[in-house]
Image (spheres, rainbow, N blue to C red):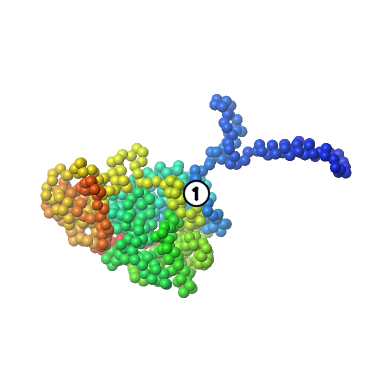
Amino acid sequence: MGTLLAIAVPRGKPRAHKADTSFVPWRILTVVMLGAALWSRPVYGQTCPAPPPTGGPRSPGLAAAQVRGSCLSRPIRPCLRKKAALCDRDLEIARIAWKYFENNYQPTTGFVNAVNKYESTTLWDLASTLAATIAANQLGIIDDRIFDQRVMKLLTTLGAMPLYRDEVPNKVYHSKDLSMVDYGNKPTKFGIGYSALDLARMGTWLDNLSCLYPRHATAAQRTMHRWNYCRMINDGQMFGAGFNATTSEESLNQEGRLGYEQYGARNWEAMGFDMAVSRSYRNMFASSVDIEGVRIPIDVRDPRKLGAFNYVVTESFALEAMEYGTTAESAPLLAAIFEVQKRRWKRTGIVTAVSEDNVDRQPYFVYNTIYAAGSPWNAITDTGKDMEHLKSTSVKAAMSLAVLFPNDPYSQVLFDKIATAYDPDKGWYSGVYEGTQGYNTAVTANTNGIILEAMMYKVYGPLNSVCRKCGHSWELRRLEGESSDTERKQCFPQSRTCFRCGETRKLTALPEKPKAPAPAPPASKPAAAPAPASKPAAAATPASKPAAAPAPASKPAAPASKPAPASKPAAAPAPASKPASAPASKPAAKPISAVAPAPRQLAPPAGVAPCAPCAPTLRPKVPPAPSSMVRSRATTRMVASAGSSSRGRVRSRKSVS
């Protein structure tokens, strides 16, 4: 380059410039040579040069050029198209949120504490952790190396951790030693049950992970292939389980209320399951109520009968919109959720964005609602205790609404209210109290995960919807190397054509007669023992209702140590106690929800045989309960409220600092 300049610039003392064109050729030559020199420089993103012939010498310089180029590092993310760029303030919001996950990461398991410095977590909070990790990588907060380290450790743990009854993940785990625990973080040998809603959120983010990072797709899918779906999804609805270690009894409960039910159903529907009841916002349990002049969707299932309140909060509607996008059904409801909170602010001057949240004082968890227990703007605990003094503006709700409605002036009001509700060394707080208490300084994985998710939504839009449009999502189907027997035993979607059995079987063609149990005593007929089949202790089908038959459930665990749980010597006639006839005593039970009316039953198609007899379901080896112990609704209130009305969450913490 120096030579070119020397040639291009004439030496000697300057002379008067005339209309002399003798230097024009030199100038043209200089420009051409400079252009050639610049053209030969390597440029990032340029096509890599072809490799030398096989067997020939490989230049170190050429190898270095190939590594520096884009050929080996081009990401496989054709689905993602940025719809907006984050400003510096948005990136700062995301970095503050990520601070929580740095502080609470458990390197031995890859889990993150659900609450700051409290070594316990749920599948819902782990899903928020996975969402936060993906967002942090997409937004440039962590590089691919750190991302892969965290994700691979998390997937390895999810693929090896103990499962409730060897079926699905327990509701709560110790985040450091991976033991199954209760809500007080105390170890429990058999677990406390599972939440279909928690697992749905985890499934959503495993699906998103598979879409955005194909290198992790197989491990993500195999995580869900560990789970057994036979009792979790039936007759178009979700069912969770609660296990009471004191009475050694298990209850199956229909999970989800309007809002969370539809959000969870989006995942299971995407995986291939029939969610005809739970997916619709216009199902038989839906209604509406007028609040602030806005029609707000509510669930009419009676909490007095079910022991579980129906909370209308922001979170479920916002999550569905940010992850899956809105539909013709959900868009007006989301708009109503936003509008009613804006109208309360206009009427009272109180900035309103409500959701369920951890709080930094007793009772440590409060449902701050638009509507609950028959009243608008109700703040209560899961047992219905009034918490009016702990009403707050939820940070995750305010941030989500501000992102979903960026052009509405109220969104700026929401953000201004919570803009300083954070600790730069810990993360975002859960909220700002409406009274004079100041910040709600509880710091959680869910709040900070949703904030990171909201920032990623600003950039890309609803990830799951984007991935499905370009064919990068997957359904729950048998993987290569898996047997069809595994598919049937775990009730993958294509096996789920019969909804009346605890373990669903494929329907067989009529020429192939269903196999009957070996000895066929009279009690083996499906209609012979309908009453015992509806007991909660059977736990092989969501039809079992804990409150429907409390008296016969006095000895649910008697046959627990044997693979035929349906045999109940103390509750059924003598012939029905034979193990051989037990499987046939259940098909008469209907997988109805916990309240009437029962969802529609799916009839077999024409020319197809009815359900085969249900196979026995393995139960944990628990000590039999004394005959005087009867499971009451009062003893299941926490299980019901954690599973049916909302989600399984870490509760009853002594400290949330």
Query: Is 5 drawn above or below residue 316 in the view shown?
Result: above
At horizontal 60% and vertical 41% (from top left) the residue drawn is 44
Image location of residue 323, percent across then percent down: 44, 54
Q: Which residue is mark 1?
A: 80
Q: Is residue 476 left or right of residue 57?
A: left
| Residue at the spot 16% in from the left edge and 53% down from the top edge | 527
Residue lying at the far bottom in this picture: please name it. Answer: 347
Q: x, y (%) of residue 99?
A: 50, 55
Residue 308 vertical position relative to residue 623 in the rendered view, above or below: below
At a point 26% along the width and 45% down the height, the residue shown is 506
Quarter the C terminus occupies: bottom left
How many neighbours does mark 1 have within 10 angstroms: few (below 14), some (14-19), or many (20 or more)? some
Question: Is residue 163 among what the camera can see?
Answer: no
Where residue 75 appears, as percent x and y from the top left, is: 51, 43
Viewer-side residue, 446 vs 591: 591
Image point 54% across, 26% down: which residue? Answer: 54
Foreground pick, 403 / 303? 403
Residue farthest top in this picture = 55
